[in-house]
Image (cartoon, helix red, strand yellow):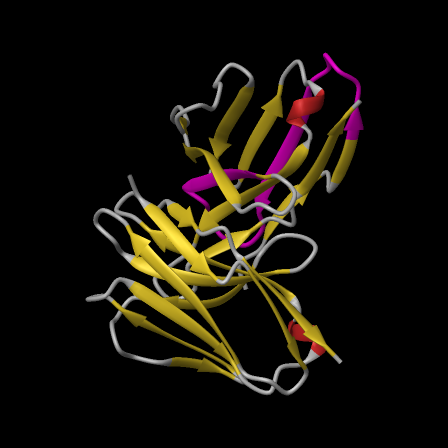
Amino acid sequence: EDKVVQSPLSLVVHEGDTVTLNCSYEVTNFRSLLWYKQEKKAPTFLFMLTSSGIEKKSGRLSSILDKKELFSILNITATQTGDSAVYLCAAVNSNYQLIWGAGTKLIIKP
Amino acid sequence: GAVVSQHPSRVICKSGTSVKIECRSLDFQATTMFWYRQFPKQSLMLMATSNEGSKATYEQGVEKDKFLINHASLTLSTLTVTSAHPEDSSFYICSARLDRIYGYTFGSGTRLTVV
């Protein structure tokens, strides 16, 4: 059965800290891995990763995929209170369906 | 960018009634739409995959007669919750697949409360 596991489930840090969120997957006919940020409503897209070892960056956020070890990490540097959210990762299977992790709830304290 | 418009954003209905949720792709053609539900503090759960012009494919444990999905055109997919019960109260989100670079786009979600 396809599954995606995220860790930690929740994380509380102070503003300015750097955080690393983990996502491991076991998906048949894996296509890609996606990271999303969810606040109050629908998830907003962060990254799509298809190739191993290539870091993607967007401002203070970066992510990388390891297809050999079947995991991805999402890094956030110099965290701000606005980064507080649930971060979801999802693996895309051969049918283009998303297999979702349970999410990491990140709380940034001022 | 590609936008999926989802309506209503919030609905309260009585037990036993039916509720229709619409998702429209505004500036692209969505041949495939995914429907999810999300319980509080939990991740998204795929309910079904709908393809334009054909029957939806439902995930195991999802009642197809209760959650009717129609994808009659390339820009509109609907989810109808029939004979709603309080346990159907949840957050429902649709999603359309875009392309290799941007992945998927989501509707803004519908908060359904059945009283």
Asked where in the image residue A56 lies, by quadrant, the reply is: bottom left
Asked where in the image residue B78 lies, by quadrant, the reply is: top right
* Residue that appears at 38% across and 51% down: A4
Asked where in the image residue B55 lies, by quadrant, the reply is: top left
In terms of depth relative to the viewer, which is nearer, B30 or A71?
A: A71
In terms of depth relative to the viewer, which is nearer, A47 or B105?
A: A47
Magenta stretch contains residue B22? yes
Q: Is residue B102 left or right of residue A25?
A: right
Q: Is residue B40 left or right of residue A77?
A: right
Query: Compared to A1, does B106 lie above or below?
Result: below
The x and y percentages for residue A99 are 39, 47
Query: Compared to A34, does A100 lie above or below?
Result: above
Looking at the figure, which quarter contains the C terminus of chain B? top right
The x and y percentages for residue A44 are 57, 61
Query: Compared to A98, does A88 lie above or below?
Result: below
The x and y percentages for residue A60 are 54, 84
* Residue that appears at 73% across and 38% down: B8
Q: What span is colored magenta in the figure?
A: B12-37
Magenta stretch contains residue B59? no
In terms of depth relative to the viewer, which is nearer, A24 or A44?
A: A24
* Residue that appears at 71% across and 39% down: B111
The x and y percentages for residue A36 are 51, 62
Looking at the figure, which quarter contains the N terminus of chain B? bottom right
